[in-house]
Image (cartoon, grey):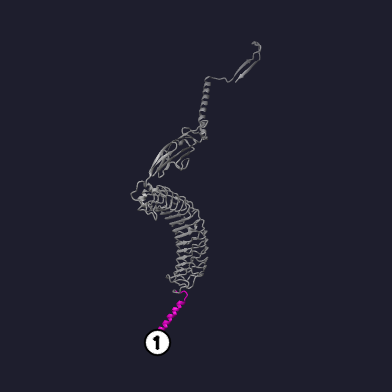
Amino acid sequence: EGMDAATAPKQVWALWRLLLLLLLLLLPGGSSGGCPTVCDCASQPRAVLCAHRRLEAVPGGLPLDTELLDLSGNRLWGLQQGMLSRLGLLRELDLSYNQLSTLEPGAFHGLQSLLTLRLQGNRLRIMGPGVFSGLFALTLLDLRFNQIVLFLDGAFAELGSLQQLEVGDNHLVFVAPGAFAGLAKLGTLTLERCNLSTVPGLALARLPGLIALRLRELDIGRLPAGALRGLGQLKELEIHHWPSLEALEPGSLVGLNLSSLAITRCNLSSVPFQALHHLSFLRVLDLSQNPISVIPARKLSPLVRLQELRLSGACLTSIAAHAFHGLTAFHLLDVEDNALRTLEETAFPSPDKLVTLRLSGNPLTCDCRLLWLLRLRRRLDFGTSPPACAGPQHVQGKSLREFSDILPPGHFTCKPALIRKSGPRWVIAEEGGYAVFSCSGEGDPVPTVSWMRPQGAWLGRAGRVRVLEDGTLEIRSVQLRDRGAYVCVVSNVAGNDSLRTWLEVIQLQPPNGSLSDPNITMPGIPGPFFLDSRGVAMVLAVGFLPFLTSVTLCFGLIALWSKGKGQVKHHMTFDFVAPRPSGDKNSGGNRVTAKLF
């Protein structure tokens, strides 16, 4: 009996332990509850993996301490309010590639610890307010590959901790101005492959903390001035595959302070210098896969901190001398797969500071212009494929790394430019006529032809006096001031040659000997003189005063003379008798008395 009394409490305690264990197992949400039979809970700690199980609803009996729940690749069609509210410790939820078409407001209520929510590959159409309420800690939201058409005002208002938002591959046509309100910490936004026809500038302005913006594969033809003005913290901007974008407006990037800008696979025909000039903190510029043919001299100099320029797969045929001057930190140039025949040392401010040069895929001519590159070939990073020679024929296909330090004769040499053909050196043209001077040269590399006046002014390729593409100098509507010398200069990297010509202009005179056009004046010929009303008054005054003085003087002299003669009779009386026809003087006739005044 003593032994029974001693063992009784132990048996009762064992019975209570068994009952407690059974009770914990029967509780549906116990922290160590059983794993749903269709899911895998053993592969990762605190993870429930239910992907690709043909589920049409969220399985029950999920452990309360679950931190990762993967329900991707199933047949879930909806998510009702409170369905996941007991999983307060959940940190990552994957609902991608289901058939979700609606999300009720409050569907994620209770998931206050959730950091990542993946909803890509569903059938969601409209994002309205309240859908993501309760997700105060969410940092990543993926909405790609849905059928979303609209983002309404306040759609993300309660996601104050969201840092990354992916909304590409949707049918998106409109983003309400207040759609992104509340996303104070959003750092990365990707809009790609949707039906937006304009950049939603008003909506983007509600993202003051945005660091990276990616706008990919959109049918947008222009980036309006000030469209991104509100993104003062933006550091990275990517515009990729806008086939209709042919130019960047000068004010399109105003208000931005970028460190990295990529405008790739668009239709830019030139580097948008005016739109870029204020980006003094830009370090990386990528303009690859645009039909850009030339990098002119010194146009990039305002980008004083630029370190990397990528222009691969473009249509580059020329990089001008001094193209990168002013860029003291420049160390990477990627111009692979272009049409460059050479790259001269003078393009760089300090060639020795260059670290990476991607130059493969260009038809390079290995002559004296590439000697500097041959000298630096062992230090430079050419990438996976070093540049190779496309000519001359004796080195065709040979990589720059294959050349020895001591070059055989005839390798990497040039022939100085010489003038071989020219037209008349003395040309006579009539005023208003047409004059042409021709000039061409030979050399290796092929020389360029330029024309200048002896005073030192180089002639351009536009205007009345211009240089044509073939080097011909054309002067239209010849004027007298065109008379004089013109100098043809042919030059290449190895030297130059010049030829002096002369233009004589014959002046044409109209039949009356005066200029036919009163608005044209020639040297030595006075032009027409016109008087206004004030000038006419002055002329009349100058002429009338001497006349009046002369008349007054004359009358004064007459008056003085009359007084000197005494009393002057102003009338007289006389008698007149007309003679008779017979001639008898004594025969009396009729007497006539007359008074003359």
Residue that appears at 41% across and 85% down:
8
On the image, the x and y values in percent for residue 389 come to 40, 50
Q: Is residue 266 magenta?
A: no
Quadrant (top left/top right/bottom left/bottom right) for the N terminus: bottom left
Tell me: residue 152, above or below residue 533: below
Q: Residue 427's quadrant in the figure?
A: top left
Q: Residue furthest front?
A: 394
Of residues 20 and 152, the one drawn nearer to the viewer in this rendering: 20
Which residue, given by chain and number where applicable, does mark 1 sit on? 5
Which of the pair 543/31 is nearer the observer?
31
Q: Nearer the viewer, residue 273 or 171?
A: 171
Q: Badge 1, how many Cα within 10 Å: few under 14, some, many 20+?
A: few
Percent x, y for residue 316?
44, 50
Residue at the (44%, 80%) spot, across then down: 19
Query: Which residues are the magenta region?
Result: 6-30
Task: Single out the residue that lies furthest toward the left.
Answer: 406
x, y percent for residue 275: 45, 51
Disc 1 residue type (three-letter): Ala
